Each structure stands twice: as C-alpha cells, then as structure tokens.
Image (cartoon, rainbow, N blue to C red):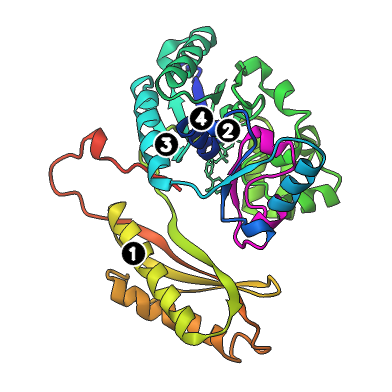
Amino acid sequence: MTELATRIVMHVDMDAFYAAVEERQNPELRGKPVVVGADPKDGHGRGVVTTANYLARRYGIGSAMPISRAWRAAEGARRRGEPAAIFVLGDHALYRTVSGRIMNVLESRSDLFQQASIDEAYLDVSSLNTFETAAHLAREIKEEIAAREGLTCSVGVAPNKLVAKIASDFQKPDGLTVIRPDAVQEFLDPMPARVIPGIGPKADALLRGRGVTTVRDLRAVPLDELTAWLGRWGAGLYASARGISDDPVSNDWERKSIGEQETFERDTLEAGFIVDRAKALTSHVFRGLIANQFAEFRTVSVTVRFSNFTTLTRSHTPKQPIKSADDMWIEVMALLLPFLDHRENPKLRPIRLIGVRAERLARLEAAGDETTKEDALRPHR
Ligand code: TTP
Ligand code: MG
C-alpha cells in the first residue's frame, strides 16, 4: 500500500509591490501614503491606480480605481489634516528587475518553483517534511528578501496551492500564516466564499443569491446542485470548498494571453488618431510575444471603452495562426474599424480606451538543446 505523502506548499506575495519599490528607491516617500498609477493631473487625470501602499489604502485608495477618484480621496484626507499622498507614475522595468532578483531567491529555496505573477510565487517544499521546518524556512526567506531588497512580503504555508494562496493573504502586510492539513477546514469555513480563486464578482453574486456567503455555506451545497448552478466549474468548487487541490507547483506555467490597453487623454472618435494608437499597441503586444518566446497565436481581441464606460470586446480566430505583426495588424483593423462607425457604434460615441490582446499563444519550438532554468520564461504581468 502506498501512503500519500503530505505536500507542503508555500505562497509568497510581495506587499504593495510597486509602491514598496518606489519607497525603497526614494527615501522621501517613506512613511507617506504612496499611489502608483496614471498622472492624477489635479483630479483631471485619466487612467487608473496600479497599486497603493498600505497608508494610502487607509484613504480607501486601491488597485484599478480611477486615478481621479484616488486624487479626490487623497485631497479629502489632506484637508482633514492627514498626510498628503504622493502620486508616482511607476517604473515597470525597475519592478521587473527587482522581481527577477526576488524570484531567484525563492527558486533557490524550493524543490519545485512556479512564478505566478510579477510579485508572487509558489514553492513546493515537501522535502522539508514538517510544517514546522517549512515555517522556519518561510521566516528565513522573509529575512533574506528584507535584507537584500528592503521589501516585505506575506507568506502562506499549507498542504496545497489553493490554501497557501488564501493563507498568504490572511495577514498582510509582512504576514506569515501556516495552515496544517488538519486545520484547513476550520481556516476556510468562516471566510467569504469569494476568497476561492475563480469566484469573481459574478459567481459571488450568483452564490449569494442562493444564500451562499461563506465557504462553510458553499460546503453545504451538494455537488449536483453546484454543477446545476455553475456547470462543470461547480465541481471544482466542491473540491475547493473542502480545501482540496492537487494542482502541481510547476515551472510549465503558460500565460494565456498578452495584451495592452491605453486610456486616451480625451474621448475621441478621430479615426486617424485611434488607428495610430492601435498600431502602436499592436506593435507593442507583438514585441511582448517575441520577448516572452512565443512564436504564434490563434486569437486576436480588441476592446473598446466608450465615453459612457460601456466596454465591448470583439475577438477573431483566423484559420491560420498569426505569426507576424503585419498579420496581427490586419486582424486588429478588421475588429477595430466597426467601432469607428455605425456598425459597432450606432450613436457614434467618442472612445475613451482601446485595448489589443493576443490569445491562445504557442511557444517557440525548442531549439534541440535543453533550455536551462535561467532561460525559462519568467512570466510577469
Ligand atoms: P498585488 O500582489 O495584487 O498587489 P500589491 O503587491 O500591490 O499589494 P498586496 O500587498 O495586496 O499584495 O499585485 C502586485 C503588483 O502588480 C502591484 O504592486 C501592481 C501590479 N498590479 C497591476 O499592475 N495591476 C493590477 O490590477 C494589480 C492588482 C496589480
Ligand atoms: Mg502583492
């Protein structure tokens, strides 16, 4: 009889990553509320907040919030006599460099490693055998990142990726949460059901409409009912609610798509301008594909947000995979032009934002010899 060994999985997520890097670079920012994102232009700026440090979050500022709203929140705080927030544009090349160094530290401490985004990674550390030793390693890793980079992170240690991820988020910032196998259920049960990855606002609303708020509620729903509500995906939730997941920590992580979007300085329907911006976005996305060692892809999508914030996405999958920026551009034009006239834009609304995305990516063929770990793709957002 074989006994299933307990896995020990660690999830590491940097705290307020971009903002923390900015604070480290610029001592004037330390101890102050910091917002990384678009230029707020005294409240008239467009675009969004990329991230905010924890002091700025106290003003209600967070990722994806319109920068104008963040600016008003900061102004309100300032008028109440609280410290003024500092807005910075962000330096993505720097964040990638810092991320790369952190990922090297994490990878060197793990049996199996998986970078999940620019600031988070999973480490399989099962060979340590006990959660106690793994917790000790987690503390060492936190100290090493603090010493080398002057940055804090939050770590979850658990029997699988699902629970480790929820655990790393449990005590942020600078947290460490260890959930042993026998404590998984009591850890998850009181949490809101939306902590389970994949439950977004839509699924959350559907579940709440059926009386499911917490993981405990979710666990009370029979499998066939979950499947009836949510399809095949519901079966996955049945397992997740029980803290069950056998998803391996794997280096073969593939990003599903690469895209870029741009918010215009002012809403416009000027075809020449929009086409120019779309062309620039297309070249940029295509360069991103090459830089990440993708050879071709199947689907192009174009997103348009109108002045009234209505947002539409149109995709097309040609018969042949797309291998060149020129071919991609032809597809982008075919998807975009209808938004400039009555076909997709009957009221001829001005456009606020456009986005271009390549989906269903295929890798370059391996060049015969084995790629080293250092050569392997380093995904980032
Ligand atoms: P997160 O880990 O989601 O956020 P965070 O590190 O800023 O804060 P937390 O302490 O809650 O982990 O994302 C990591 C970085 O990725 C973040 O600093 C900025 C960037 N990012 C985006 O570019 N767009 C986004 O929508 C989000 C959420 C993050
Ligand atoms: Mg983070």
Mark 4 and mark 2 in contact? Answer it, CB < 8 Å: no
- Find out if the beta carbon at label 1 lies less than 8 Å from the nearest ligand 1 atom: no
Residue 197 spot, x, y in % from top left:
62, 41
The quarter of the rendering in which ligand 2 is drawn is top right
The amino acid pointed to by label 3 is Gln
Local packing at callout 3 (Cα closer than 10 Å; few below 14, some 14-19, many 20+) is many
- First of labels 4, 2 by sequence position: 4
Instruction: Please state which of the two labelled residues, at mark 1 or mark 3, is closer to the viewer.
Output: 1
Q: CA distance from mark 3 to mark 2?
A: 15 Å
Mark 4 and mark 1 in contact? Answer it, CB < 8 Å: no
The residue to which callout 1 is attached is: 286
Q: Quadrant of the N terminus?
A: top left
Local packing at callout 4 (Cα closer than 10 Å; few below 14, some 14-19, many 20+) is few
Instruction: Please state which of the two labelled residues, at mark 3 or mark 2, is closer to the viewer.
Output: 3
The residue to which callout 4 is attached is: 27
Figure check: 362 above or below 5? below
Residue 213 occupies which quadrant of the picture? top right
Local packing at callout 2 (Cα closer than 10 Å; few below 14, some 14-19, many 20+) is many
Mark 1 and mark 2 in contact? Answer it, CB < 8 Å: no
The amino acid pointed to by label 4 is Pro
- First of labels 1, 3 by sequence position: 3
The amino acid pointed to by label 1 is Phe
Instruction: Please state which of the two labelled residues, at mark 4 or mark 1, is closer to the viewer.
Output: 4
- First of labels 4, 3 by sequence position: 4
The residue to which callout 2 is attached is: 162
Figure check: 366 above or below 8? below
* Left or right of 170 in this view: 76: right
Mark 1 and mark 3 in contact? Answer it, CB < 8 Å: no
Q: CA distance from mark 1 to mark 3?
A: 22 Å
The residue to which callout 3 is attached is: 115
* Residue found at the very far left of the displayed protein: 368
